[in-house]
Image: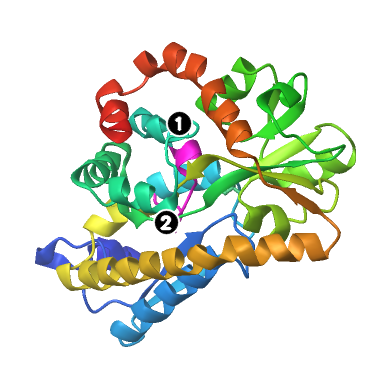
Amino acid sequence: IAAALGLSIWAGGEGGHAVAQSDSYTIKFGNVISVGDTQNQGYALFAELVEERSDGRIKVQVYPDSQLGGEREMIEATQFGDIEMTAPSVGVLANFDKSLEVFDFPFIFEDAETAYKVLDSELGDEMLAGLENSGLIALGWGENGFRNLAMVKGTVRTPEDMRGIKLRTMQVPMHIAYWRSIGAAPTPMPFPEVFTSLQQGVVDGVENPYELLFSARFTEPAHFLTETRHIYDPEVILISKTFFEGLSAEDQKIIRDAADEMVAKIRSLKSTISDEIRAKIVAAGGTVTDLTDEERQQWIDSAIPFYKENASKVDTGKLKAILE
Ligand code: PAF
């Protein structure tokens, strides 16, 4: 019947693979990141390696710039196998797997090296493996980076300055709860709506890593930046579980190995990009403010009531392990 219907999904015969080993196929990899950004340079390397190592049998078509929708939509599309891959922010993905919410706690990582220690540990592996319960295979941790503030009307230095400020956030409950706990007015909104909202004064500011703030041109209306580094935002490289499990062991290995190299490339590009982009923002007329040690301590302290309120609402064991 399959043959009569021309359905290649059973073409693997006894092997039971949804996609036969000799089959050529295309992996659609959707993301919301601008085309030239470091993540997309990493995704392009992945595409190149997979194609090369499969002798052109496997093509990876990367769709940047939200061409296939927002992060939530693309996670769902990957679960259902409508697209094969995506790489959302961990914050948005935590809506699908609550154990990831621990990364949404502000000031949990001092620097990227500490974050990598956790992500690359058994705990990090366990968290990636847990995504199988949501119909997703995680191929590795990508990286958005540390999130900073960009404001329209003036520089923010302390948590007190955030009182009453309408801040665009992601649709991430823990982020929203933190900003609310310090008296701000968090305004969750999908990424594609943010630029116009900043221009029209619907929100007073936005928070994201420098690279995203700049490539999405948010730093044009919101050119008062503060290096708060309030949240380290890893992304997760996802592939559809049903799709992946239907592949031959050989193809799975090609994909996993290329994903490891993609992650290494993204990390290495990220290690210098913040400083480069920061300089570009200043050259374009923006201001970037560093916090004094005392101000930074005020920010860290500002999160303590939030931790007290929310630590018991997430996977407390994981939260403790990370803090330790
Ligand atoms: O601000 C956001 O929505 C996220 O940081 C983004 C840009 C979608 C990347 O995950």
Q: Residues within 10 Å of mark 2 (few under 14, many from 20)?
A: many
Answer above or below: position of 13 versus 206: below
Most foreground residue, 180 or 129: 180
**Where residue 51 sits: x, y (%)?**
37, 81
Disc 1 under 8 Å from ligand 1? The reply is no
How far, Cα to Cα, is label 2 from label 1?
A: 18 Å
Residue type of the residue flagged with mark 1: Asn
**Where residue 131 sits: x, y (%)?**
30, 41
The tag earlier along the polypeptide, 2 or 1, is 1
Mark 1 residue element: loop
**Where residue 64 sits: x, y (%)?**
59, 63
Of circles 2 and 1, the one toward us is 2
> Residue drawn at (27%, 44%), measured in percent from left and top?
124
Identify the residue under disc 2.
142
Q: Residues within 10 Å of mark 1 (few under 14, many from 20)?
A: some
Identify the residue under disc 1.
95
Q: What residue range appears in magenta?
A: 80-93
> Residue drawn at (51%, 25%), measured in percent from left and top?
174
Most foreground residue, 90 or 151: 151
Mark 2 residue element: loop
Quadrant the N terminus occupies: bottom left
